[in-house]
Image: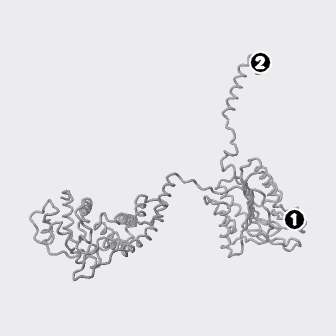
Amino acid sequence: MLLTDPLTRPLRWLLLAGLMLIMAVQPVKASDDDDDEDDDRLALVIGNGAYQNITALDNPVNDAVLMAKHLTEVGFEVTLVTDATQVELGRAISAFGRKLRDEGDDTTGLFFYAGHGVQSFGSNYLLPIDVEVLDAADLSLVGVPADAVLRQMYSARNRTNIFILDACRNNPFAEIPDLNDNGLAEMKAPRGTFLAYSTAPGEIAVDGTGSNSPFSEALASRLSEPGVPIEALFKEVRRTVLQQTNGLQIPWDTSSLTVDFQFSPAVAPTPEELQLRQLWDSVKLSQDPIQVLLFLRANPDTIFNDEARALLAKLLPQSLNQETAAAPAEAPAAPKPEPVDPEVAERDMIEEARKTGTAEAYKAYLEAYPTGAFAELARLELTTIETNAQSRDPIAEPVAPAIEPAPKPAQAPPAEKASTEVAFNAPLGIGGPEIATRSIAELITGSPMFPPVEGLPESFWKDKTCAACHNWAQSNLCDQAQTYLKESTRALDKQHPYGGAFKKALQTWARGGCK
């Protein structure tokens, strides 16, 4: 039945309408500017090693496979050809040129060749595996001119082309007259082309003692480095190859690129990352250990953490030395030692904790100076030490022997019932007579009975007032006492300059509101 029949005309219009609707919703091919970057990168990678009539090479096929893998990872659509004959090599190059011309102006083309390559009369030739040359005049008939590849790429009129040759490993025709030149001849890069050799013109590259040539291995390993311009990337490849070959092989490149190119473009930072970077730059510029400490405290897990810790370790001793040097000279020695400057004592104590690096030393500092200038640092380091200790294997770690508490003075007979209230200016009524008969206000102006830190030299605490050693005042001492409401019994039993009974008295005082 014909759709031109009057009876079928409505059906015909219905089909036409449906066809128009289908065409309307079909996706239109994006313009060159909108193409995804993966579709705009084409590569032809060739590795020839299994030569039939000249010296075979071990690594070119491995090099081609390695390059194809890494080029694919950075967005190239790769055509891989290995051990190609003259016919196969010519067809692959021709097809590559056609595809480049079809893709458009914004396409990036890349050609990589690993295998034998020779020069004759100033021209370079890539050798297929079935090449056979008896006279220099035969080379242009059986080899593939490197210029032919450049012509195919240039004919596409695209903005960026990359041409890489790892092809001067040795001269297989050294015995043939007019074919005894080493390496490749220098080539000019057409407009928009980056041209690279594995070694300088006229020089020989090594095939490599491993599974890849030094040049191909160094190049492939760097393709995924983000934000590196192609010129800088090949400079790093040159340095690596020079080092690995003891200066015998110097990769060479020339460029006529008119646009910037990166194999792996840098990922734009998020607004949050930019803000954090700006904050860290300002903190680093301040060279202030307190600012660095506060940055670490507020941002404990960032990419700047290691740098911040290193800077803090550098600045803290400098800051302590500067403050000590700036401190006023002490008065002439008197028969009785002068009280230690509270600020100097605090700096000495945090410096001692930093040197020993133990949790006990930092805890002792926090007990003495819960709101001190370095309290945040001490808490941060203490958290790090305790976290590391928890992550260790408890079986593998030896258990530290318990430290015997210092002998306590003789205790008075215990009272029938300990006081349930403690006031700042009233006798404590807890512990031995040295403690129970005195108030907190009296005790903080007295001398400690035990060192605040195990092993602390006597010069730091002996015959010193506790107020000088600990920067104690009623408000500061209340802050310290509040911590005992949260601590375990073990913390309360730990040695204190006035003994454990004083800690328990402070706990009771804090529980009553520090009155």
Q: Position of residue 503 (x, y in %)?
A: 21, 66
In the rendered view, tell whether residue 373 sits above or below residue 404: above
Q: What amino acid type should be assigned to the residue bearing mark 1?
A: Leu
In the rendered view, tell whether residue 254 sits above or below residue 259: below
Q: What amino acid type should be assigned to the residue bearing mark 2?
A: Asp
Q: CA distance from mark 2 to mark 1?
A: 70 Å
Q: Secondary structure at mark 2?
A: loop
Q: Position of residue 159 (x, y in %)?
A: 73, 52
Residue of label 2: 5
Image point 41% across, 66% down: which residue? 289
Q: Position of residue 394 (x, y in %)?
A: 37, 67
Task: State whether residue 119 appears in this view.
Answer: yes
Image point 18% across, 64% down: which residue? 505
Disc sitting over residue 259 in the figure: none
Left or right, residue 296 beside residue 446: right
User: Residue 321 is drawn in which quadrant?
Assistant: bottom left
In the rendered view, tell whether residue 65 sits above or below residue 496: above
User: Residue 153 is drawn in which quadrant?
Assistant: bottom right
Quadrant location of the N terminus in the rendered image: top right
User: Callout 1: 10 Å neighbours few (<14), some, many (20+)?
Assistant: many
Q: How many numbered markers are drawn?
A: 2
Residue of label 1: 139
Q: Secondary structure at mark 1?
A: helix
User: Does label 2 or label 1 sit earlier along the sequence?
Assistant: 2
Q: Position of residue 409 (x, y in %)?
A: 16, 75
